[in-house]
């Protein structure tokens, strides 16, 4: 498969692995195939002792748009539970990673993509990024750990507001509530610099 057509592109720069969601024409959905590609990539990267950081980012003006709604519509109770557990396990592997994990949020970060970002150690966003959990408008709630992680990071009241209203929040609003740790442009450069600084500090600590 040509690299440009893959849903996830992996680039290794020294001790840093950059994983880029690569379906901008579809708003980078976290479809089953994309999650399986992510699982495969992480299975290869997480055991590597030569990697100190893993950065997740998107393409153009989209970080990722969450689960594919068309796929969700085809799920029955049994397959929905399986898909939820698959996503939970995958995102937990990011939360448990030995490496530093950073979400470099370059644009829209919606639904399950926000769950993914929450599983990372750090979240850095571009000034044009936008955050939302739109499931409330669709009568669904995230099943990939976001309900737990979000309340721990921003507090119960803020998390409840975000889930119930399905509102959209700018980078500045996300920074003020503690959802992200930094606003920076270009965001990937900032994430790489942060990763290098953290790795250097860990080496001499």
Image (tube, rainbow, N blue to C red):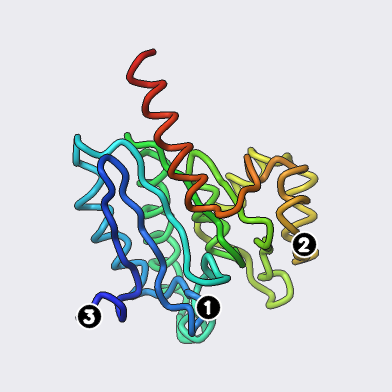
On the image, the x and y values in percent for residue 181 come to: 63, 40
Of residues 39 and 19, the one nearer the viewer is: 19
CB of mark 3 within 8 Å of CB of mark 1? no
Mark identifier at residue 27? 1
Residue tagged 3:
2
Nearer-N-terminus badge (2/3): 3
* Tally of marks: 3
Q: Is residue 169 above or below residue 203?
A: below
Image quarter (top left, top right, bottom left or bottom right) of the C terminus: top left
Of residues 143 and 112, the one nearer the viewer is: 112
Q: Is residue 151 left or right of residue 173?
A: left
Residue tagged 2:
164
Q: Nearer the viewer, mark 3 or mark 1?
A: 3
Residue at position x 63%, y 65% from top? 141
On the image, the x and y values in percent for residue 96 come to: 37, 38
Q: Is residue 185 left or right of residue 78?
A: right
On the image, the x and y values in percent for residue 52 come to: 31, 36
Q: Is residue 194 left or right of residue 50?
A: right
Nearer-N-terminus badge (3/1): 3
């Amino acid at each position: 498969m040509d690299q440009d057509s893959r849903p996830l592109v992996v680039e290794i720069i020294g001790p840093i692995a950059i994983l880029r969601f690569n379906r901008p024409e579809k708003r980078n959905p976290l479809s089953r195939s994309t999650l399986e590609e992510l699982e495969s990539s992480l299975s290869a990267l997480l055991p590597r002792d030569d990697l100190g950081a893993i950065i997740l980012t998107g393409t153009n003006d989209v970080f990722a748009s969450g689960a594919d709604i068309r796929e969700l519509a085809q799920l029955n109770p049994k397959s929905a539970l399986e898909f939820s557990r698959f996503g939970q396990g995958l995102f937990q592997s990011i939360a448990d990673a030995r490496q530093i994990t950073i979400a470099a949020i370059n644009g829209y970060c919606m639904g399950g993509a926000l769950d993914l970002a929450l599983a990372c150690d750090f979240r850095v966003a571009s000034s044009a990024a936008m955050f939302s959990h739109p499931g409330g408008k669709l009568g669904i709630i995230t099943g990939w750990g976001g309900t737990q992680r979000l309340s721990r990071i921003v507090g119960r009241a803020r998390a409840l507001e975000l889930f119930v209203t399905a509102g959209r929040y700018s980078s500045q609003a996300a920074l003020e509530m503690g959802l992200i740790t930094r606003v920076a442009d270009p965001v990937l450069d900032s994430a790489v610099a942060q990763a290098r600084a953290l790795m250097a500090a860990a080496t001499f600590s």
